[in-house]
C-alpha cells in the first residue's frame, strides 16, 4: 500500500534539491558564487569583495570598502543535467526502475544591492541593503511514468540589511540581519502545493588590514529556521509541518594585491558549513569544508580579467533511519538513501572566469562571469546520480555616486 505522507516527504526533499542541482555549488546555498565579480573568482570574497552584493551577503565588515553611494544589479542563469537511474522498485512511493534526466530548465536568479557611506555625516560606517537569491531551481520527471509523477520547485530569497564600521584605521567590524522567504511547490502526484515559509538570520564579521595591500576577513552566520506549515500529508489525510534549517556557516578569507605592482589581486576563502546542527539537513549531510580561490588582473584601469577555482567536500553522509524535518520515514534506511540520491550536491571541482569593465560609462561599472562544475556521479544503494553540463553565466552593473571602492586596483 502506498503511503501518501511518505511520498509527500520525498517530494519536499526533491524541492529542496533545486538550488543544488541547478546552481552548481555546495550544499543548498549559493553564497557568492553568482555575484557579479565574485562569480568569476569562484566566490572568493570574504576579505576583499569586488562587488557590493558579496559584501552584503557574506562579511558585512567589508561594506567599509565601498565609498559614496552605490547601486548594483546582477543576474545569472544556472543550468545542469541531473540524471537519476533507479535500479529497484520502491513500492511505498509507487516508483519502479527508471533512468531519466530532469526536464526542468535552468534557473534565472537576480541579486540587487545598495550601499551608503556615512562618513560625510561624521560616522565611520557604511550601510548596505540587498535583495539576494539564496537558492532556486527544480527537478521534473513527470514525463516518466515509473517516477510516479516526481516534480518539484524551490525558491529562496533574502532581504538583508547590514552595517560595517571602522574600529581603528585597520580594523573594521560589521553585522547584518536577513529576513528570508522560501517557497516549496510540488511534490509527488499533486499531493501538495505551493507552501511558503519565513526565517531570520544574523551575521557578524571583521576585516583587518595586515598591510596596505594584504587583508584578512572572517564572519559567522547563524542558522535560518524555516517551518513549512501543513507541507506533508500523513496517511489518513492529516497535514503536518516540515521543519528545515539553513546551516550555520563560518568563513575565513585572505586577499593581497602586492603582486605585479598592485595589478594582481589574489584571494582565498575557507568556508565551514555546520549541517549537524541544522534540522532536516543533519539527516542527509555531514559538516562540510569548501575552499575558494580567486584572482583578478588589471590589464588597464578600464579592464580587469578574473579567474577562479573552487573545491568542496562531498557532504553526503551515511544513511540511518531517522526523522527528517519532523517526519519519520516509514521505510528506514532504504528510504533515506533514495532521498539522498534525489538531491545530491556531489560536484566537487569548479572553475570560473570573467571580466570587469570599470567606468564603461562615467560612474558605471560592468561585470561578466561564467563558471563550470566538472562532471560527478555517486551511488546511493539502488539509485545512481549523475551531474553533468553544469554551467552558469551572469552579469552585473554598478552605478557609483560620490566615490568608488578603495579596493579597486588603479
Image: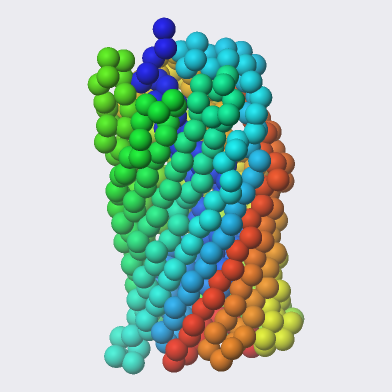
Quadrant showing the C terminus: bottom right
Q: For this view, does 342 lie left or right of residue 9?
A: right
Quadrant showing the N terminus: top left
> 209 or 306: which is nearer to us?
306
* Residue 127 can be seen, yes or no: yes
Residue that lies at the very extreme toward the top in this rendered image:
1
Residue 236: x, y in percent? 27, 14
> 44 or 236: which is nearer to us?
236
Q: Is residue 343 above or below residue 149?
A: below
* Residue 256 can be seen, yes or no: no
**Quarter of the rendering containing residue 225:** top left
Colouring chosen for the image of the structure: rainbow
Query: What residue lies at 61% left-to-right and 73% top-to-bottom?
Result: 367
**Quarter of the rendering containing residue 395:** bottom right
Q: How many marks?
A: 0
Q: Is residue 175 above or below residue 244?
A: below
Query: What residue lies at 63% left-to-right and 56% top-to-bottom?
Result: 392
Query: What residue lies at 31% left-to-right and 15% top-to-bottom?
Result: 235
Residue 399: x, y in percent? 49, 82
Residue 219: x, y in percent? 43, 60
Query: What residue lies at 45% left-to-right and 53% top-to-bottom?
Result: 134
> 317 or 183: which is nearer to us?
183
Residue 380: x, y in percent? 60, 23
Amino acid at each position: 500500500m502506498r503511503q501518501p505522507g511518505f511520498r509527500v516527504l520525498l517530494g519536499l526533499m526533491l524541492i529542496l534539491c533545486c538550488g543544488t542541482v541547478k546552481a552548481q555549488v555546495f550544499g543548498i546555498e549559493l553564497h557568492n558564487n553568482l555575484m557579479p565579480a565574485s562569480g568569476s573568482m569562484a566566490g572568493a570574497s570574504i576579505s576583499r569583495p569586488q562587488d557590493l552584493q558579496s559584501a552584503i551577503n557574506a562579511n558585512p565588515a567589508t561594506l567599509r570598502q565601498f565609498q559614496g553611494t552605490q547601486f548594483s544589479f546582477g543576474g545569472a542563469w544556472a543550468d545542469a543535467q541531473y540524471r537519476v537511474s533507479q535500479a529497484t522498485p520502491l513500492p511505498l512511493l509507487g516508483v519502479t526502475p527508471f533512468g531519466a534526466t530532469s526536464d526542468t530548465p535552468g534557473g534565472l536568479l537576480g541579486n540587487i544591492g545598495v550601499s551608503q557611506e556615512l562618513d560625510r555625516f561624521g560616522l565611520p560606517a557604511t550601510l548596505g541593503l540587498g535583495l539576494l537569491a539564496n537558492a532556486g531551481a527544480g527537478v521534473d520527471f513527470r514525463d516518466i511514468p515509473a517516477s510516479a509523477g516526481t516534480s518539484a520547485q524551490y525558491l529562496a530569497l533574502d532581504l538583508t540589511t547590514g552595517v560595517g564600521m571602522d574600529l581603528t584605521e585597520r580594523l573594521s567590524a560589521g553585522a547584518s540581519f536577513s529576513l528570508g522567504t522560501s517557497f516549496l511547490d510540488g511534490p509527488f502526484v499533486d499531493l501538495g502545493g505551493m507552501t511558503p515559509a519565513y526565517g531570520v538570520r544574523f551575521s557578524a564579521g571583521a576585516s583587518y588590514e595586515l598591510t596596505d595591500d594584504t587583508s584578512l576577513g572572517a564572519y559567522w552566520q547563524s542558522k535560518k529556521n524555516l517551518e513549512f506549515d501543513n507541507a506533508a500529508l500523513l496517511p489518513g489525510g492529516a497535514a503536518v509541518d516540515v521543519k528545515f534549517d539553513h546551516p550555520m556557516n563560518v568563513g575565513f578569507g585572505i586577499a593581497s594585491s602586492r603582486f605585479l605592482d598592485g595589478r594582481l589581486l589574489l584571494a582565498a576563502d575557507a568556508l565551514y558549513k555546520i549541517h549537524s546542527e541544522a534540522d532536516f539537513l543533519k539527516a542527509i549531510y555531514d559538516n562540510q569544508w569548501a575552499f575558494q580561490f580567486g584572482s583578478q588582473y588589471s590589464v588597464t584601469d578600464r579592464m580587469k580579467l578574473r579567474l577562479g577555482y573552487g573545491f568542496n567536500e562531498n557532504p553526503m553522509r551515511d544513511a540511518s533511519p531517522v526523522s527528517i524535518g519532523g517526519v519519520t520515514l516509514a521505510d528506514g534506511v532504504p528510504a533515506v538513501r533514495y532521498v539522498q540520491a534525489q538531491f545530491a550536491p556531489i560536484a566537487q571541482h569548479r572553475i570560473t572566469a570573467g571580466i570587469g569593465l570599470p567606468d564603461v560609462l562615467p560612474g558605471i561599472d560592468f561585470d561578466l562571469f561564467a563558471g563550470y562544475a566538472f562532471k560527478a556521479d555517486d551511488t546511493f544503494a539502488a539509485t545512481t546520480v549523475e551531474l553533468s553540463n553544469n554551467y552558469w553565466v551572469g552579469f552585473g552593473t554598478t552605478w557609483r555616486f560620490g566615490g568608488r571602492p578603495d579596493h579597486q586596483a588603479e
